[in-house]
Image: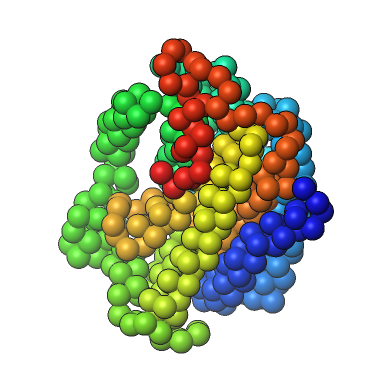
Amino acid sequence: MTRSDVSVSVQTMAVPAALLVTVGIVYANLAAYPAMVRSGEAIELAVAKHIAIASIGVAAMFGLSRTTFDRLKRLSPILLVVCILALGLVWMPGIGHTANGSSRWIGWGLLKLQPSEFAKLTLILYIAALVSDPHYGVNTIQGLIVPLFATAFVCGLIMAEPDLGTAIVVFLGVVHLLYVAGARPKHLAWVLAGAGVLAVVMTMSAGHRRHRVFAWLAPGDYRETSGYQIVESLIAVGENGIGGKGFAHGEAPHFVPAADTDYIMATVAEETGLGGVIVVLGLMGVIVWQAHRVARGTHDRFAGLASTGAAALLIWQTLINVAVVTNSIPSTGVPMPFISAGGSSLLASLAAVGIIARPRAGASDTGTSRSSATVGGGRSAATRASRRVALPWL
């Protein structure tokens, strides 16, 4: 591959990502403006901070797109350990930061990071490196033990913060990756069933989560309590036609809690209408389609799996965020990639784009064939993955 081939690939991915980031800079700060007025924070400072974080993310995106997958593969266990240690630091006095009853951040002053956002990516890289070995039996129950144990450990730390939404995204992203890698559907079905039972038990045993389920089923009955956010979101989403109310004419920033973070799409939908939402989802679709192309175009199994796994995180995060805003599922805190306020989420989303763009630049990093070995008799995991790796949305 020539240097120009690398640039074209990264630029193709960067354009929709940059447009989504721009939407985020505009609408996240617009949605947060009423709160800024109440707190006395200058919107100019907030916008400047947002742009600075986006610039760091773009630099990380281009840096990752030029990093060889051999290096990422070697570093993946170390990166995962670092993120796990960072997840443990959220409870350490003087380092961890608690807000709204959750201990999700580390840092001081204006410099705060949310380790779970980076743990998502490093876990995907670690598992992709593990199952990319053509002799690894991902199509066996024994082969699923290590990936699922690592996933359970990371998800357990995230849920303890508590942050059930991010844990769900991590879990679904890993299952997605394991399927593409060649795991048997019946094995993954048992995993999903077990996780589903656990999720129901955890939801119904926690008062605030149980109330969210009740509010999801009948938001009007809980309009003054746990259903308030849902009702206001549905009003913002549902009454604005194709073109919306117009820039800065919406009421969601004044009435929808978390209008700049988890419910940012309510603000976007109210002001830009169905047309604006279609544009946002279309740009996200372009990134997913490019992930399909680059995963299909590489002969390096780790490259294809890492690209697919990074895309899977963006897919599931987007689906869950939109489903929550439209009350299609019970409310859970998951930011919209690239758009929601939050520096860690933005950095992680742009880093995912860098990983997705990398296979085309390094298709011959190792030259490992996707279908080079048979595992456990019969059809190999690598052979099945050679078909699935081209379809990251499956």
- Does residue 211 appear left or right of residue 271 in this picture? left
Q: Is residue 24 above or below residue 275?
A: above
Q: Is residue 183 above or below residue 263?
A: above
Colour scheme employed for the rendering of this structure: rainbow
| Residue drawn at (48%, 72%) of the image | 279
Q: How many marks?
A: 0
| Residue drawn at (27%, 36%) of the image | 200
Q: Is residue 142 above or below residue 257?
A: above
Residue 53, picture quadrant: bottom right
- Residue furthest toward the right? 3
Residue 185: percent from the left, percent from the top?
35, 29
Q: Nearer the viewer, residue 299 or 72?
A: 299
Residue 377: percent from the left, percent from the top?
44, 12
Residue 241: percent from the left, percent from the top?
33, 82
Q: Nearer the viewer, residue 341 or 126?
A: 126
| Residue drawn at (60%, 53%) of the image | 349
Q: Is residue 215 above or below residue 15?
A: above
Residue 327, picture quadrant: bottom left
- Does residue 196 appear left or right of residue 79 in this picture? left
Res. 178 in view:
no
Residue 203: percent from the left, percent from the top?
30, 39
| Residue drawn at (54%, 73%) of the image | 27
- Does residue 166 appear left or right of residue 295 in this picture? left
Residue 195, picture quadrant: top left
Q: Nearer the viewer, residue 296 or 88?
A: 296
Res. 129 in view:
yes
Quarter of the picture containing the C terminus is top left
Q: Nearer the viewer, residue 144 or 110?
A: 144
